Image (cartoon, helix red, strand yellow):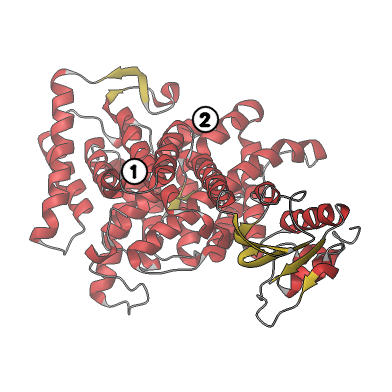
Amino acid sequence: MAIAAENLSFRDPDAPLTPARLRIEVLSGLTVALALVPEAVAFAFVAGVNPLVGLYAAFIVGLITALIGGRPGMISGATGALAVVMVSLVAQHGVEYLFATVVLMGLIQIFVGIMRWGKFIRLVPHPVMLGFVNGLAIVIFLAQMSQFQVPGTAESAGHGMANGAWLSGAPLYLMLALVALTMFIIWVMPRITTLIPAPLAGIGIVAAIVIGFGLDVPRVGDLASIEGGLPPFHIPMVPLTWETFMIVLPYALILAAIGLIESLLTLNLVGEMTGKRGGASQECMAQGVANTVTGFFGGMGGCAMIGQSMINVKSGGRTRVAGVVAALFLLSFILFASGLIEQIPLAALVGVMFMVVIGTFAWNSLTIMAKVPPMDAFVTILVTIVTVMTDLATAVVVGVIVSALAYSWSNAKRIYASTEVTDDTKIYKINGPLFFGSSDGFAELFEIEADPELVIIDFAGSRVADQSALQAIEAVAGKYEAAGKRIQLRHLSHDCHMLLSKAGHLVVDSDDDPDYEIAADYSVKTGILGSH
């Protein structure tokens, strides 16, 4: 990834929590909390709900996942990927149905965690991951563009801006200058001192300049007021009927899938940066518990936030303390410090996110495109484009499907046979995997009418992979027997012997027969092949 793990000074999340480490974690948590405020407010507007609904979700989801999540250092909260799905539900049925959906979403995620299905995230190929992080970087960059619009009525614009009017002239130049200053501070600060996380230093210095000189630039308060109280316990006020369940179920399934995919990919990305592995099923459970609780406390639900997770890791956050502190700081902003936080210039937060973009984008992918197989390059570009055009989860699913189809097609073309003819015997030596994709090609290898009386098919160089392969073997054997010719099958594994119901008597046992289980092994145990 673009942010190399070797560039990080602290890699062990399980190291003792010394005073120095605690200071880093607290400051990192503060930095994340400041960056969470405009994100949560903006995503609440996208979903069509009150800003506090987004802030409560960021607090509750962030706190619970920080305590019991699968990877210390990850940050969770309200996200745009979920908000764009929620907007139609809120528009058609109201916010109470959203809360009910978030509860059901959480229960689905808990079930996925119990079933330990999170491990399947390892099936995401590397080109998909490259496209994912590149697309994510572009999405984060484009999301900041709304901050360069004229501040107006947040509720009317949906993103805290009115009529989409862009800044121009002196206000635009001032905004750009402050963004550039923030980025410069973040870049130069580690070279001066590591006592304060660079993003926090950038926000603090630029905010001090803006407030001290009274500069007229967009601020957090221009999005919406973040003042509020503790999130109240609230049972979703929806009819407990089958009709209600059928309304919320499709949304809950989509939200659960998107939330888990984004969270597990974030888990992998943070794992690469911190040198840690595992925790996928635990993260599913944590996300599920967090969303179930959030639905009962007036929150819009959420999942892992890759941008904020990158800020945390880059700021030095490696333990659960940083995530907990970020959530508690966010709550304190809502309760006690809304007036102060609302004075922070958006330019400082945009500068932080631009540095996240630079650090997230896999720049090396631009140089390796010509060196990797064309299909890998195509998948990387495809996932990047789909991520930008739709959402992260859809892009990953598309990428995995295309990669799987490409892999299957590549292997389907690898099957071939070399032949030996001696007197009245012909030996076919099969090479390459035999599975559903190559079964047709396997059948085309044989010249049944022209072959001699005895035909031997040797599978020493092949691998029988599934039920389609077994059926292809039986079909070829049946054609030879129908033509009145003898056929022998050699070097098939013992499980193939059992599964070949018709051609099993044609198998010749050898001491060097392979020993592997094929995908159809489960089928014979359940009687699927019993009718052959």
Query: Can residue 231 be seen?
Result: no
Amino acid type, label 1: Ser
Q: Residues within 10 Å of mark 1 (few under 14, many from 20)?
A: some
337 vs 69, left or right, is left
Residue at position x 18%, y 42% from top? Answer: 207
> Where is residue 121 drawn, in percent x and y?
53, 57
Q: Judge by depth and name the residue closer to the eye, 22 or 283.
A: 283
**Residue carrying label 1:** 338
The answer to which quarter of the image holds residue 503 is bottom right
Image: 319 above or below 384:
below
Q: In this orientation, which residue lies closer to the viewer: 170 or 270?
A: 270
Disc 2 packing (10 Å; few <14; some 14–19; many ≥20):
many
Question: Is the residue 77 above or below the residue 22 in the image?
Answer: above
The residue most toward the right is: 531
Q: Quadrant of the C terminus?
A: bottom right
Which structural element holds mark 1? helix
Question: What amino acid does circle 2 point to?
Answer: Gly
Instruction: Residue at 62% x, 32% y: name it.
Output: 89
Q: Nearer the viewer, mark 2 or mark 1?
A: 2
For the residue pair 11 and 220, the one nearer the viewer reads as 11
The residue that appears at 59% across and 29% down in the rendered structure is: 88
Q: Which residue is mark 2?
A: 48
> Between marks 2 and 1, how big is the CA–CA gap?
22 Å
Q: Horizontal and vertical percent for residue 340?
A: 27, 43
Residue 427: assigned label: none
